[in-house]
Amino acid sequence: MPDSASRNEFTVQGIAASQGIAYGQIFLYLQNEVQVPDYQVEVEKRIDEVARFDRALVLTRQQVARTKSEVERNIGPEEAAIFDAHLMVLEDEALIGETIREFESTGRNIETCFHRVSTRYVQAFSEIDDEYLRERAGDLRDVTQRVLRNLLGQEESSLNKLADRRIVVAADITPSESASLDRSSALALVTDSGSKTSHAVIVARSMKVPAVVGVRDLTRRVRDGAWALIDGYDGVVIVNPSESTLFRYGKIQERKKSFEARLLDAVRLPAVTLDGVGITLLANIEKSDEVGKVREAHADGVGLYRTEFLFLNLGRAPTEEEQFEDYRRVVESLAPSPVVIRTLDLGGDKPIAGNASLFPHESNPFMGFRAIRWCLENREVFKDQLRAILRASAFGKVRMMYPMISGADEMARANAILEECRSELRARGVPFDPALEVGAMIEIPSAAYTTDLIARQSAFFSIGTNDLIQYTLAIDRGNDRIAHLYEPTHPAVLRTLRHIITEAHRHKVPVGVCGEMAGDPVFAPLLLGLGVDSLSMTPAWLPSVKYLVRSMSLADARALAEEAMGLSSPAEIYARCDAFYRARVRLD
Ligand code: PEP
Ligand code: MG
């Protein structure tokens, strides 16, 4: 097996997830649970063992205090407060005393004793009825991992810790970890598992950070600090690249750069096709501080604000007030352009970490307790969000949509709760837009085939192709083993899209797409040809899609869609879309 220590160049093929080329040193992010060795400590070494425990606790306290002040400085005091809970754990007499007693009675090494005791505590906390105390289980787990790492002399693993610009190589990155990805220091992102639509990739794309996923066991084949070249166009990772490889890639990069300069020139121009049809291009965002990017990309507004990241970043449900301030910031600064706020899509692959009571473990999370299903059962959290959105609607043009709607009944239940919120605000005398448009995401096949029924209660639809494809094809969007079967051009996907669009238009409901397909210039013409009214994508991709829109006619796109509808193979349909794109967009 090639090894980076040998300095020989070796290449790994993965899935191209975010375009771009990067060259730099690897930051190996190993965030797995610490493996705890278990052994007997000789009697004469027992005093040293307790001293070792004390030293690890002191070191951990120093690390936590340092992280706390960094977070306070960079993010804010409220977010930093979580580390007070961590410091309390490190001073907890009961936890420390019990560990020492366990050690005295068993003589096993201190890591084992500490691990046993803390696991019992975590278990006990997660079973308590009080929500606040239950949440402390997550803090306890977090901080005990740090102590164990210090006892074992292992490096602290944190994405925030990236000191200089590095290529992050990880087994996988959870949505909350990707939220903490330092935007100024990640040169590229590479993960052993994952797919093009994982949230880490969506974040990487939004940061214009090249990404390659599905490289299987790369984390076991490279060492921290090794040099690598990442080709996010073709999904290739080259470790220890030779001079000639670097030269070859340098040339490619130059050509891509000059093409990107042309794209940026086009971004100020209107998104009008050669046959004179204006196309609405919107932006997807996950944080309120991304409004600058929306403006820079000259988007017509926000087509998808994924609000769950506010929750994930805080590690708890924000208050109505906190959410209102966040939404208002976005809405006000983009007014009069519309902002589509999507209600919470938590759960599934996006639980709030360490919160087992609100997000119990599920063996099949994508089919589980997520999004609107979760909100309908956590009414108070949902209502805080709905009131915050309604209140923000007084400050600009807000639209709101629910994720993962499965049918008309669910839509009616969500709308009934919204109505309650409207009444509450009226009673409080708080202003909101009475004409706020409410729509549904169509991303489950059952919703696709009841589009006509849901249309009666919807002002607009937004098709979430990321989920729609996974549910239509029964392909887990995050599973790299079957990533090659995740085919946006599968005839079943095309037929489902056509059905949704036809039914929506028959009921005079506009329909857009906000999944990753919308921001891919290879697929955008197909979607427009099928009849969608708008495309919403990560702002970084808007220039490419706009450039393409300005280089094609809608009549040609319609012909492409008609032809594609008559084909039976996903590969053949993809080839037609790719040819359409290449005929209009030349790299040099
Ligand atoms: C989608 O499913 O296409 C979508 C836009 O939502 P998310 O990726 O947040 O699930
Ligand atoms: Mg979705």
Image (cartoon, rainbow, N blue to C red):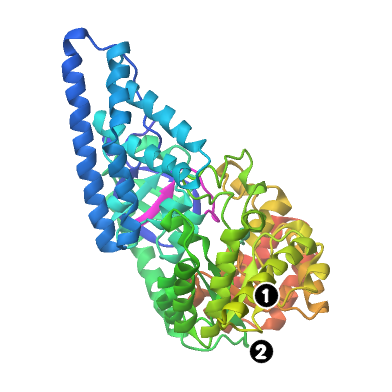
Asked if residue 415 lies left or right of residue 42, the reply is right
- Indicate the quadrant where residue 147 lies: top left
| Element class at badge 1 | strand
> Percent position (x, y) of residue 167?
33, 52
> Percent position (x, y) of residue 555?
72, 82
Residue type beneath disc 2: Asp
Residue at 44% from the left image edge and 46% from the top image edge: 191
Residue at 67% from the left image edge and 54% from the top image edge: 373
Mark 2 crowdedness (10 Å alpha carbons): few <14, some 14-19, many ≥20? few
Mark 1, ligand 1, within 8 Å: the answer is no
- Residue 520 visible in rendering: no
Assess whether residue 188 is covered by the magenta stretch: yes
- Vertical arrangement, residue 469 with respect to residue 157, above or below: below
Assess whether residue 108 is covered by the magenta stretch: no
Asked if residue 494 lies left or right of residue 127, the reply is right
Q: In which quarter of the image is the C terminus?
A: bottom left
Q: Quadrant of ligand 1?
A: bottom right
> Percent position (x, y) of residue 178?
42, 54
Residue type beneath disc 1: Val
For this orientation, the residue located farthest to the bottom is 276
Looking at this view, is 442 or 124 the one in front? 124
Precedes in sequence: disc 1 or disc 2:
2
- Indicate the quadrant where residue 121 lies: top left
In the image, which residues are magenta? 187-198
- Residue 404 visible in rendering: yes
What residue would you read off at disc 2?
A: 275
Q: Quadrant of the N terminus?
A: top left
What residue would you read off at disc 1?
A: 438
> Percent position (x, y) of residue 61?
22, 41
Asked if marks 1 and 2 touch (Cβ < 8 Å), the reply is no
- Indicate the quadrant where residue 77 lies: bottom left
Asked if residue 313 lies left or right of residue 370, the reply is left
